[in-house]
Image: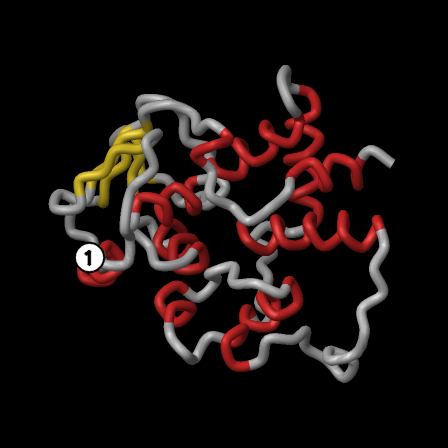
Amino acid sequence: MARDRGPQCKQCRREGEKLFLKGERCLTEKCGVERRAYPPGEHGRGRQKQSEYRLQLREKQKARRYYGVLEKQFRNYYDRASRQSGVTGENLLRLLESRFDNVLVRLGFAGSRRQARQLILHGHWAVNGRRVNIPSYHVRANDVIAMRAGSGATDAVREATDLVSAVPAWLQADHDGLTAKVLRHPERSEISVPVQEQLIVELYSK
């Protein structure tokens, strides 16, 4: 399975804001954006040439890195969103939010999407009683998520639950029993992602 193994703090610095790719570390003074608030590289402190294309590209890259998907995967999500009824940009974010690894982060069962993917790949979670080891698995309304019996990751998951302040309204979590339920699909107002999805649609529509 293809994965992005690059430095995560550099990705946040490139986009100029925290994408919370490292979980708890992003909340401390060790955060790369806090320590060096300029893009990485030899010319990071130089002037950035602004253009319409650059703004659109940066929004696309920001969304892709925020959810931890590769370029081809992201394009496939966009193509799928454009075939659905409704607003393409909102459909795109809704598809990305429904990824299993992202849902675990929203529920507070993982400190970051990279940690969520590792927990899923190692088979620690089940959906509707069946083991799911695919991070890109799309959850649906009324799906029940639970940690598998005998899992050795219980302590790590309980530590992650301490970082979450609130669970989105479209999800329901039981942090004591380490179970959750998907109530419905999220609305755009419930998706807290620092992305202007319309710029992504404009980029792919050219």
Q: Is residue 175 left or right of residue 194?
A: left
Q: Residue furthest top?
A: 85
Q: Callout 1, which amino acid? A: Arg
Residue at 39 percent of width and 63 percent of height: 23
Residue at 35 percent of width and 59 percent of height: 111
x, y percent for residue 118: 40, 57
Which of the 4 image quadrants contains residue 156? bottom left
Q: Which residue lies furthest to the bottom in this view?
A: 42
Residue at 43 percent of width and 53 percent of height: 117
Residue wearing tag 1: 158
Q: How crowded is mark 1: few (under 14 residues within 10 Å), some or many (20 or more)?
A: some
Q: In which quarter of the image is the N terminus?
A: bottom right
Q: In this view, does 70 lie to the left or right of 8?
A: right
Q: Is residue 9 left or right of residue 139?
A: right
Q: In this view, does 202 lie above or below 57?
A: above
x, y percent for residue 155: 18, 62
